[in-house]
Amino acid sequence: MRFYYIALKEIKSFIKNPYIIPPLLIVHFLQFVISINVFNNFVGESTITKNTFATIEIINKNNNTNIVIFYGAFILTQLLALSSIIVAAYITSEWENKTYDRILVSPLSIFQINIGIFSGYITLMIIISALFMFLISVLYGFDWGGAYFNIFIITVSLSFVCVTFAMLISNIFKQTKIVASIATFTVVAFIFLSGGLFAGAVFNKISRYTLIRWAFDAYISVIEGKPLGSVSINLINILLTGIIFMAIYIMITRKGDR
Amino acid sequence: MPIVKVNNLVKRYGSILAVDNLCLSIEKGETFGLVGPNCAGKSTTIKMLVGLLKPDRGEIFINGIDIVQNHKEIKRNIGLVPQDVAIYENMSARENIEFFGSLYGLYGKNLKEMASEALEFSGLYEKQNERPKKFSGGMKRRLNIACSIVHKPQILIMDEPTVGIDAQSRNHILSSVKELGKSGTTVIYTSHYMEEVESLCTRIGIVDFGRIIAIGNKNELKNLIDSEEIVAMELDNTSDFRLDELSSLDEVSSAVLHGNQLQIVTSNSHGILQDIIEIILRQDKKIININLNTPSLENVFLKLTGRNLRD
């Protein structure tokens, strides 16, 4: 059970840093509120707004889904996906600072060490998502439909992918700047392509192949009261992606020197 | 039975042979110094000793047990002070020590007591609740050591623990190493500072190109160049000074410059002093000071490797 100390240390390091979780929650809460307000101002219309820097197209309201639920689910997914960038940077900093070497020198097996890191960050992601859910429930009156267990299962699955992704790229590149750049590019690209930033038909076809879309569609379904079985395909896709990341990670760590 | 026994250790990085059939035997309670220039293979050897790298060939036995086969059991008895300060800046000194102690199976009251001992040993007890962010380089190095000794290892491997620190912290670390040696801990100490190794270690191994090229206590090593002397000269300036003229003299083993200090190792200092002075004057340099010294370990190293330790 000594991996527990590694997990606890990861959680503590993250929580003790005041510049990570509070800004992450505040920014996502604001995004949630602003997205809904912007959408509500253009309900039923397809409008193009122009400003100096960009053209933003706001598409018709999706008739099948309550827009509040849509953004709640999407932003929760986005929050977890973006957290994986920070996790990747944290794991890489352990490589750079040689503290990971020091852990490897201890009598713990590589399996125990990985389980420690893995369980620590998954727990952390569950804590972050729970805080976000609590925040928008209290401050915005968001109704999670009482589907807390189902949301928990989806969150664990999504966190599994996010953490395995973070562990994989940090193990391959081992330099914080490179890892942060690659993770940011990948995550932001998938968030964009998932179509969640625009409530409507934008990227509808391509988004079906993105992990973010699988996750927030699953969230939407369970919040709307559908059973977990109705999102089983999404969950299988998410878990399979995580398993592939994990398999590559194990292959790399077994092959190389410790 | 030696506590550490290394047989024909080989490690390659691609085409580079980092460790080349290295053999080593260290007795229990010994403070063993491993010295060598950069890229000599010291750190690679240490990484293999602690199980961070797998040897391509060869065997490592700790307490008679093969580390490759039983690394988990052996690691309980090893402490590593890495070359880089490997601590968590966002955790307090005590939290750092307790975290690394917990990885070795310490917990509860025992962990707290042993962490307190490590803090006292490293002179950081008063700073136990402070984060290393605020520490000086020397204090961080001391914390680096405290994290490695919290579980009271039988073998402590220290990879250049005094690099880039102030004199006060260096003295503290050196006296700590002596204390550990007295308490029966086997210490393997690598350094770029020959004077440190000379004062701390009961035996010294000189490594170059991945091999141990000389091993023994300091007197045994000095005997390797016993017949030689060192002519140490201070010159007014050494810009454009051509060392090759001195090196080409028959009885000169080596000639090196450190700033304005010229050091010549020779087997016949009296016989060639005149030639040396003439060469210097021919190059329009003024001699400020001349000394004749007996060889130090630094000179032994220079003779054996052809390089300065800090090159």
Image (cartoon, coloured by chain):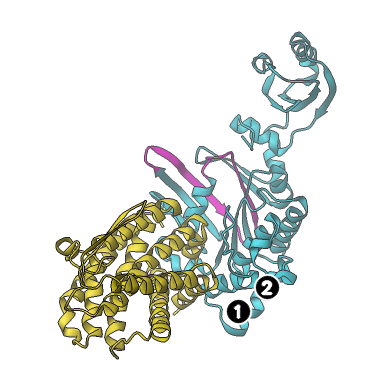
- Write down the region rendered in magenta: B13-41
Residue placed furthest toward the right: B289
Quadrant in which residue B272 is drawn: top right
Q: Magenta includes B85?
A: no
Q: Residues within 10 Å of mark 1 (few under 14, many from 20)?
A: many
Q: Residue B53: x percent and y percent?
A: 43, 54
Quadrant in which residue B291 is drawn: top right
Q: Is residue A233 above or below residue A253?
A: below
- Labels 1 and 2: the sequence-earlier one: 1
Tell me which amino acid carries mark 2. Asn
Q: Which mark is residue B111?
A: 1
Q: Is residue A159 above or below residue B110?
A: above
Q: Nearer the viewer, residue B157 or A174?
A: A174
Residue placed furthest toward the top: B282
Q: Say which colour chain B has.
A: cyan
Tag 1 and tag 2 share a subunit: yes
Q: Residue A115: x percent and y percent?
A: 38, 72
From where the camera sits, is residue B186 visible?
A: yes
The residue shown at (20%, 62%) is A202
Q: Which residue is mark 2?
A: B129
Q: Say which colour chain A has.
A: yellow
- Quadrant of the rendering where the C terminus of chain B is positioned: top right
- Quadrant of the rendering where the N terminus of chain B is positioned: bottom right
Q: Nearer the viewer, mark 1 or mark 2?
A: 2
Q: Going by the image, does A42 lie left or right of B21?
A: left
Q: Residue A23: x percent and y percent?
A: 48, 69
Q: Going by the image, does A93 lie left or right of B310?
A: left
Quadrant in which residue B97 is drawn: bottom right
From where the camera sits, is residue A255 visible?
A: no
Q: Residues within 10 Å of mark 2 (few under 14, many from 20)?
A: few
